[in-house]
Image: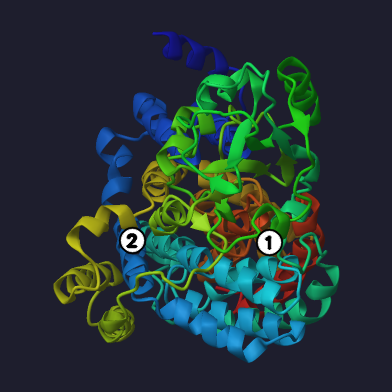
Amino acid sequence: MFFSTLVSAVQGLVPAAVTVDMLVVFALILLSLVLFATEWLPIDVTAIVVMVLLMVLEPWTQITPQEGLSGFASPATITVLAMLILSTGVNRTGIVQHIGRKMAAFAGNSQTKQLAATISVTGPVSGFINNTPVVAILVPVVADLAHKGKTSPSKLLMPLSFASMLGGTLTVIGTSTNILASDIAAQLGRESPGLGLHAFGMFEFTKLGVIVFAVGSVYLMTVGVRLLPKRVPAEDDLVEEYALQEYLADVVVPADSSLIGQTVHEALGNDDLDIDVLQLIRYGEQFLEPLARKEIHENDTLRLRTNRETLERIMRSEGLTFVGGPRSESELHPGEEEPVMVEVVIPSGSFLVGESLASSTFRQRYDANVLAFRTRGKVVRDRFEDIDIRVGDTLLVQAPPDSLTRLVQNEDFIVAHEFDDADYRTEKTPFAVAIIAGVVALPAFNVLPIVVSALGGVVAMILTGVLKPNELYKSVEWNVIFLLAGVIPLGVALQQTGAAALLGDAVASTATFLPAIGVLWVFYLATGLLTSVISNNASVVLMIPVAASAAQSIGANAFSFVLAVTFAASTAFMTPVGYQTNLFVYGPGGYTFSDFLRVGAPLQLLLSVVTVAGIAFFWGVGA
C-alpha cells in the first residue's frame, strides 16, 4: 500500500517518456552504486539485497521471482563457478609456481628482465586460467623475485596485477567479466535478433586482446615503470618497512614486580593494554608461541609489541626495566628456528572479511601475533584488534613454522612469501594441462558450449585426482558467484522496463555532434570510470544493455559497442578497488590510492584509444 501510494505521487511529477517503472529501477541502480562504492555492505550482500528488492517491487521492476533467481541458473554464473574450480586444480599441481621460478632464474638482478618476465608470464597464463587466482599465486613469487634481485616489490607488483587484466582480454575465459558479457550479449541477441548479438567465441576477440596486451606491456616497461614509486625497500626487512622500531621493546621483570607468578595472559592479556608478548627469554632460553599460559619469573625478558605510551605506563606500574629492542628483522629473529615474519593478504571469500582480529580469534587459531595492519594504504601499528577486515587488507604476522605452514595451506590467506616445502601434486600436471586444453578446444571448435566443457573439465579433474571431491567447495569464491547471481536480474530489469533504451537514447543523442566512433569511445570511458568505483561485473550488467540500445538508436554495430564495454570493464587500472587483483597487490606493494591513479589513468586513456580503434578496424562501427 505504501509503495503504491508513493508511486502514484511520483507518477504525476515525471515526464511522459520516463515511466515510474524506470524510476524504480534507476533508484535501485543508484542504491547499488552507493553500496558498491562505499562498501557499507560486502559486494555480494549488496547484490543479493538488490535482487530481493527487484522481486519485492515486481509490479514496477517487472522481475518475477523466477527471473529474480535466474542469476543462479545463468550459464555465466555456472561457467565462472566451474572455471574457479579448474583454476584451483591447476594451482594444486604447482605448474604456475614452477613457471614463476623459471621466471626468477631468467630475470636475475636486472629490473628490466624482472618486469619483462612478470608481464610475459602473467599475461598469457591469465588468458586461460582465471586471472584472479593467477595473481594470488604469483604475489609471493614476484615479491621474492624482487627482494632477491634487489628491486623494490613496488616496481613489480602493480604490473603483475595490470598484466593479469591485460591477459584476461585474450580469451573469453580469461576473466569472469568476459564470461558474463558473453552471456548477456547472447541473451540480448535472442530477445532482439535485429541487434546481431551472440555469445562470444573462445578466441573471437583474441586479435584485439593481443594488441591491447602488447600496447599495455610496452607502456608498463617504459612509462609505467618510471611512474611507479619505490614504496617498499628492496631489502627484505619488514620491521623497517612497517616502521615498527618504536613499537617493539625488550623489558626485564625485576624481583619486586607483581607480574611474577602470573601467566602471560593474566599479567598482560587485558585487551585495554594493547600489548602482545612476542617472546619470553629465561637464562638464554627462548620461549615462543603459545605464551599465554607461560608463568612469568624473576629476571625474565619479555619482548613486547605496544606503543610507547602504553610501554611507559606498564614500566612505571610494574617496575619493568627497558633494555632496548629490535631495530631490524635480523635483530628480531637472529636464529634460524625463530618464528617467521610474513605479510598475509586477505582475499575475497576469506572468513576474516567483515570480522576483526578479536572477533575472529585469529591469534588463538594460529598461535600467531599480528604486529601491524595495512588497510587501504594506511599502516596501523597499534589498537587494530577491533578494526573490521576488508578484502585486500594486509596483516604483518609473526608465527612459528608450523603455524605458518597452516597459513600457507589455507585458502583464506595469501602469504606474500614463497616457501619451498609447499605440497604440490606435480605428478598430476599432465592431466591438468590436458583438461584445460580440452576445456578451451571444445568450445573453440563449436563441439560443446563453454559451460558444458567447463563442467566436464571439473568432472575430469576429480576423476584423474587433480582435485579431491572435498576441495570443490573450497575452490569457489562464493562471493563472486552471489555477486553474479544478484546483479544479473538488475540487467534484466533495465531491459524489460525500457530503462536501458531510455539511457541508450540519451547517450545516442551525442551522435548529433560526435561520429559513431566517438559515441563508442564515450561508452568505453564511462564503463572504465564506473568500474573504478564498483564491481567490474556490475559495470558490465549495467552498461551492455545501454550500449546495445544506443548502438541500435544510431544505426551502429551493437557487437562493437558490447565489446568496448567488455574490454573497459576488464581493464580497470585507476583505483585499487576497481579490480580484485589490484587489492591483492595493494598491501604487499605498499601502494597508496594515488599510485594507481598516477600509473593507471594514462594506461586507461591510452588503451581507450587503442581498443576503440581496434574495434573499428576489425568489426567496424556502422551496422
| 294 relative to 583, above or below | above
For this orientation, the residue located farthest to the bottom is: 106
Q: Earlier in the sequence, mark 2 or mark 1?
A: 2
Picture coordinates of residue 422 (x, y %)?
A: 40, 69
Q: Count the marks: how many? A: 2
457 horizontally vs 231: left or right: left
Q: Which residue sits at x=62%, y=91%?
A: 106
Residue identified by numbered label 1: 573
Residue 164 visible to the viewer: yes
Q: Please name the amino acid that badge 1 sits on.
A: Phe
How far apart are the alpha carbons under marks 2 and 1? 33 Å
If the image is split into quadrants, where does the N terminus sit? Answer: top left
Q: Which residue is mark 2?
A: 190
Image height check: is 169 above or below 323?
below
Identify the secondary structure beneath mark 1: loop
At 74% across and 38% down in the image, what residue appears?
249
Scheme by which the image is coloured: rainbow
What's the mark number on residue 212? none
Position of residue 72 in the picture relative to residue 286 (left or right): left
The residue closer to the viewer here, 130 or 245, is: 245
Residue at 37% x, 44% y: name it. Answer: 482
Q: Is residue 255 shown above or below 493?
A: above
Horizontal and vertical percent position of residue 470: 20, 56
Task: Indicate the secondary structure of the residue bearing disc 2.
Answer: helix
Q: In the picture provided, is 592 more to the left or to the right than 564?
A: right
